[in-house]
């Protein structure tokens, strides 16, 4: 008898958890984390990875296992560029307001769920400090746009009110250096921890 009772309880819990994924839901929370930036370059420029950070908010609207997740966060991206030919070095720090618009799929039950998501990102530059080295040249200086575009790919894990996300951000628009002979794309990884403030 106990065996049937346990089987019934597991079946009901599994059915309830699965049906919950099909109901419309809304979640809102905060997030913060670190990023690792690099620039894919051509010709003479080379870049090295440097750590930055991000902090902001996220929302998630979902039903039938799918969700739309817009986010808004402040991010600082750092990179060091070198031009071997000109002997120039540039330590650059960029601050921007980033707006990812992600679509994803959620899997899981019993308060733990895995997610995959992807979508475009619009980045609005608010500051771009650059410190060019001793060489009398702007060869390593970047020409930064006020508005940039990227595409994010990532996966996440939800547990209780917490969420952990790892994403790769592929730069879509090209930047140029001071000489204009290198086409550069900004790419980065980011790892964030989120906290759900409320859900409906």
Image (cartoon, rainbow, N blue to C red):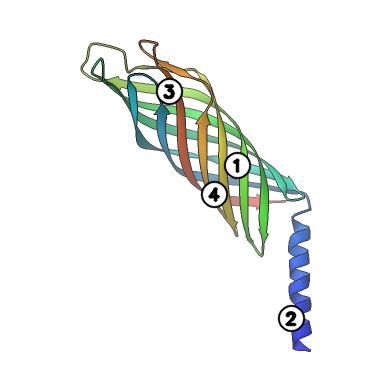
| Depth order, front residue of 197/40 | 40
Label 3, residues with CA under 10 Å away: few <14, some 14-19, many ≥20: some
Give the Cα distance between marks 2 and 4. 35 Å
Give the Cα distance between marks 3 and 2. 60 Å
Give the Cα distance between marks 4 and 1. 8 Å
Image quadrant in which you'd find residue 35: top left
Taking the image as shown, residue 97 lies to the left or right of residue 5, namely left
Choose the circle earlier in sequence order: 1 or 3: 1
Dot 2 falls on a residue whose secondary structure is helix
Mark sitting on residue 58: 1
| Depth order, front residue of 187/133 | 187
Give the Cα distance between marks 3 and 4. 25 Å
Label 2, residues with CA under 10 Å away: few <14, some 14-19, many ≥20: few
Residue depicted at 66% across the width and 65% down the height: 110
Mark sitting on residue 127: 3
Choose the circle earlier in sequence order: 2 or 4: 2
Give the Cα distance between marks 2 and 1. 38 Å
Choose the circle earlier in sequence order: 3 or 2: 2
Dot 3 falls on a residue whose secondary structure is strand
Residue depicted at 36% across the width and 18% down the height: 43
Choose the circle earlier in sequence order: 4 or 1: 1
Mark sitting on residue 141: none
Residue depicted at 32% across the width and 18% down the height: 140
Mark 3 or mark 2: which is in front? 2
Is 121 located above or below residue 25 in the figure? above
| Depth order, front residue of 147/58 | 147
Mark sitting on residue 194: 4
Q: Residue furthest bottom?
A: 1
């Amino acid at each position: 008898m106990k065996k049937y009772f346990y089987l019934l309880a597991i079946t009901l819990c599994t059915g309830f958890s699965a049906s919950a994924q099909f109901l419309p839901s809304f979640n809102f929370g905060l997030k913060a984390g670190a990023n690792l930036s690099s620039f894919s370059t051509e010709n003479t420029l080379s870049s090295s990875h440097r750590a930055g950070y991000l902090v902001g908010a996220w929302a998630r609207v979902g039903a039938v296992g799918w969700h739309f997740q817009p986010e808004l966060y402040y991010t600082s991206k750092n990179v060091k560029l070198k031009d071997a030919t000109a002997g120039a070095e540039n330590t650059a720090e960029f601050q921007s307001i980033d707006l990812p618009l992600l679509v994803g799929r959620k899997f899981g039950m019993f308060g733990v769920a895995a997610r995959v998501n992807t979508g475009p990102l619009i980045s609005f530059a608010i500051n771009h400090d650059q410190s060019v080295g001793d060489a009398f040249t702007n060869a390593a200086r970047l020409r930064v746009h006020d508005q940039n575009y990227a595409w994010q790919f990532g996966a996440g894990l939800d547990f209780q009110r917490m969420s952990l996300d790892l994403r790769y951000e592929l730069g879509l628009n090209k930047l140029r250096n001071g000489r204009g002979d290198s086409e550069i794309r900004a790419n980065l990884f980011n790892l964030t921890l989120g906290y759900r403030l409320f859900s409906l």
